[in-house]
Image: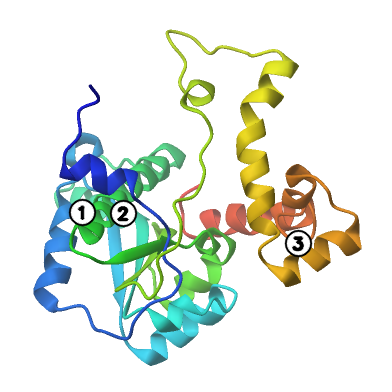
Amino acid sequence: MIPENDVITSISSHRSIRNYKSNPIADDVLQTILQAGLRASSSGNMQTWSVIVTRTEEKKRQLYQAHYEQHMILQAPIVLTFCADTHRMRKWISLHQSKQSFDDFLGFLTGVMDAALAAQNMVIAAESLGLGCCYMGTTWWSADQISEILALPACVFPCTSLVMGYPNENPEIRDRLPLDLIVHEESYALPDDAQFLQKHAAKEQATWDRYKTFPELKDKLKERGITKVTDFYTSDLKYPKSLHREKSEMLIAHLKKQQLF
């Protein structure tokens, strides 16, 4: 018998919400969610992360532009921007006149992990309270603009964002890769090519079937002769190599500007 409880049921039912009601999130509900983030695991209990809560229409409009005009930024009552933050740790060290540290790439990566753990704690807490969330991958794409919008000081870097609010949709639970393709026992197992394709087959089919439910996307795929999910993922409709190159160069430059690389 597979053990199950309310927490496992909630996690297993997760879906990204992209349409929200206008209902505000009460302050006590938000504080409960933020406290759940505070209780996340943290390297050395240093908690090298910060989160910026955005609620005003003016600031959300700025973030909407930075996040490639995704409507959920304006719909959701709250946007949370999670940052790797070694500024606070380095300031604390400096004020005590201790040896400076964490002013390097490892310090930055530690902050990214801390921020991600806190964000996921908040998602689980929010969903348990009837709220919905969606991670914004465009945080990386516009890290330089978001840093300016939110007035982030040196040594603070935006690494993910959440829109959060009461769902105005009930999307189906999305497909996932099979567990035995992701989980390895003792050492990394390399399947042969046939096994590799076979283990991806179900997800490929489910993803392709979902694409066909969007008429505009279906037409664009047909126009470009795209017949495989992998072709779509690397096309100019999704994540072209030119985008990866451009954003990688921006991220490296911005890490240097923020004194994190």
Crowd band around label 2 with a 10 angstrom C-alpha radius: few (<14), some (14–19), many (20+): many
Which amino acid, mark 3? Leu
Q: Tag 2's secondary structure?
A: helix
Which residue bears the numbered disc 3? 237
Q: Residue furthest top?
A: 186
Residue 224 visible, this orientation: yes
Q: Residue furthest bottom?
A: 58
User: Which residue is located at x 89 percent, y 59 percent?
Assistant: 224
Which residue bears the numbered disc 2? 119
Q: Quadrant of residue 185?
A: top left
Q: Quadrant of residue 46?
A: top left
Which amino acid, mark 1? Gly
Crowd band around label 3 with a 10 angstrom C-alpha radius: few (<14), some (14–19), many (20+): few
Dot 2 or dot 1, earlier in sequence: 1
Determine whether 131 is above or below 206 in the image. below
Which residue bears the numbered disc 1? 37
Dot 3 or dot 2, earlier in sequence: 2
Residue 105: horizontal and vertical position, in percent? 46, 41
Front in this rendered view, residue 234 or 242: 234
Spatial CA distance of label 1 from label 3 is 34 Å
Q: Quadrant of residue 138?
A: bottom right
Q: Tag 1's secondary structure?
A: helix
Determine whether 78 is above or below 101 in the image. below
User: Which residue is located at x 20 percent, y 48 percent?
Assistant: 93
Of marks 3 and 2, the one in the foreground: 3
Q: Tag 3's secondary structure?
A: loop
Q: Which mark is residue 155?
A: none
Q: Is 140 on the left-hand or right-hand side of 248?
A: left
Spatial CA distance of label 2 from label 1 is 6 Å
Crowd band around label 1 with a 10 angstrom C-alpha radius: few (<14), some (14–19), many (20+): many
